[in-house]
Image: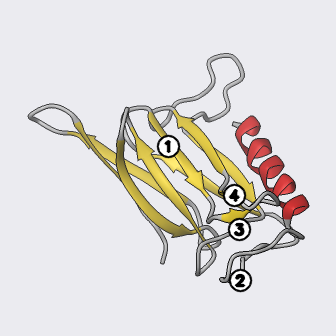
Amino acid sequence: MRRISKCLIACAAIYAGFSLAPQTARAQDIVSQPICFNVKNEAPYKVYGSFVTDYYTRPDGIRARHKSNFRLEEAGATHKEKGYPIDRAEFCTFGPFYPGRKLELVIRTLVPVFSCKTRIDQGEIVIQGHRKPEGGTETTAKCFE
């Protein structure tokens, strides 16, 4: 999971190098110090997802955004050898954020099953879910406005 955090920080650092490029008409929300936040899986099964930043314009004029993928094991899972929790992770980002200092959270299987734009400075983001009696699962997250 630390690799995911480092990837998100690296992407943001790369973006900082592009910050002198022409910007879109809307002002970009980028911070000088990373904002870190935690995500926890309370579902009784593994979940996959992504955090996605707002768009920015690269020096070559192409619109792009940063995306960091994650996998969280079922609620209560710990690393078999080292004992640390693997149902949660920490992420850090510089942005660019959506209005209100938000990132997009997408939870997926093979296709997206849940999406929201959530503030990341309001506390732990909790993913919840349950298995349906008729089969399949229902997965959501507590997103902050």
Residue 113 percent location from the top left of the image: 33, 46
User: Splitting the image into 4 quarters, where does residue 110 fall?
Assistant: top left
Residue 6 percent location from the top left of the image: 80, 43
Does residue 108 lie above or below 38 as drawn?
above
Q: Amino acid at mark 2?
A: Ala
Q: Nearer the viewer, mark 3 or mark 2?
A: 2
SS category of the residue bearing label 4: loop
Density class for disc 2 (Cα within 10 Å; few <14, some 14-19, many ≥20) is few
Front residue of 45/26: it is: 26
Q: Amino acid at mark 3?
A: Pro
Label 3, label 2: how far apart the Cα atoms are: 10 Å
Residue for badge 1: 49
SS category of the residue bearing label 2: loop
Q: Nearer the viewer, mark 2 or mark 4?
A: 4
Label 3 or label 4, whichever comes before in sequence order: 4
Label 2, label 4: how far apart the Cα atoms are: 17 Å
